[in-house]
Amino acid sequence: MLFGDPTFLLVIPALILAFYAQAKVKGTYRKYSQVSAASRMTGAEAAYQLLQAAGAGEVTIEKTPGNLTDHYDPRKKVLRLSQGVHDSTSIAALGIAAHETGHAIQHHDHYQPMALRSMIYPVARLGSTLAFPLFFVGFFFSRGSSNVLMDIGLLLFTGAVAFSVVTLPVEFNASKRALALLEERRFLTPDEMVGARKVLSAAALTYVAATTMAAVQLLRMFLLRSSRD
């Protein structure tokens, strides 16, 4: 029933988009991670200067293991850059470092969508963990109280989808800030800015794909729930 019912057909376009987005971001990152910026500035150096210019000097910068594991931790006010970004002078590194710096500046500026995302996060985390087990236990044993399990699963996953939706403007805004900062501070030349835009656009597509998949899965859950009434 998980893969054989007609509602699974709804997931296929979302899966194709997700695979395409992953291939796109990896290919674009690979290309522009091999092209060094004329400024010879590393990702960490760019992040530091941008944070200082924005008055967010309280944010610390750390190197984190892994590939494309870059993120900003608003609880600890720490900007974590992967080794391929922290120490690299590539166009991709500067674009990603500036994007994550954009998140730190959002936090510093009390950007409301980011605050909303942080507020939703605990529910979303719980929802992404428990929603499917509860729903499908209720689905396979759909009698009486089992329907309540499906409803709880639906409610929890709705929170996870809401988190994905709120994430979109936060990510788009961070990329917009990043590109504006890189151009304003002249960390990249106009030609190099083209590459940075491609890197950040590819990264944004992964968030669009994730939100699409979450929304389709929620629709599928509603359809399966209706079939048990």
Image (cartoon, grey):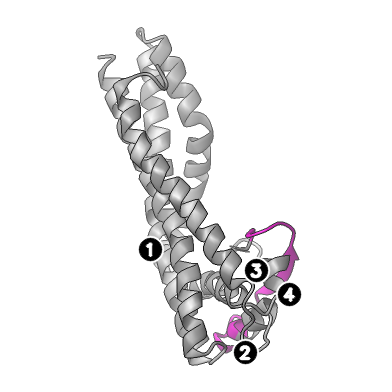
Find out whether residue 51 is within the magenta segment: yes
Q: Secondary structure at mark 4?
A: loop
Mark carried by residue 169: 1
- The amino acid type, in three-letter code, at marker 2 is Ala
Find out whether residue 74 is within the magenta segment: no
Please name the residue shown 40% across and 43% down the image.
16
- The amino acid type, in three-letter code, at marker 1 is Pro
Q: CA gap, disc 2 to disc 1?
A: 31 Å
The answer to whether marks 3 and 2 mark residues whose Cβ atoms lie closer than 8 Å is: no
Q: CA gap, disc 3 to disc 1?
A: 20 Å
Q: Secondary structure at mark 2?
A: loop
- Where is mark 2, residue-wise? 38
Q: Quadrant of residue 205?
A: bottom left
Q: Please tell me which of labels 2 and 1 falls first in the chain.
A: 2
Tell me the crowding category of disc 4: few under 14, some 14 to 19, or many 20 or more residues within 10 angstroms, Cα based. Answer: some
Q: Please tell me which of labels 3 and 2 falls first in the chain.
A: 2
- Where is mark 3, residue-wise? 79
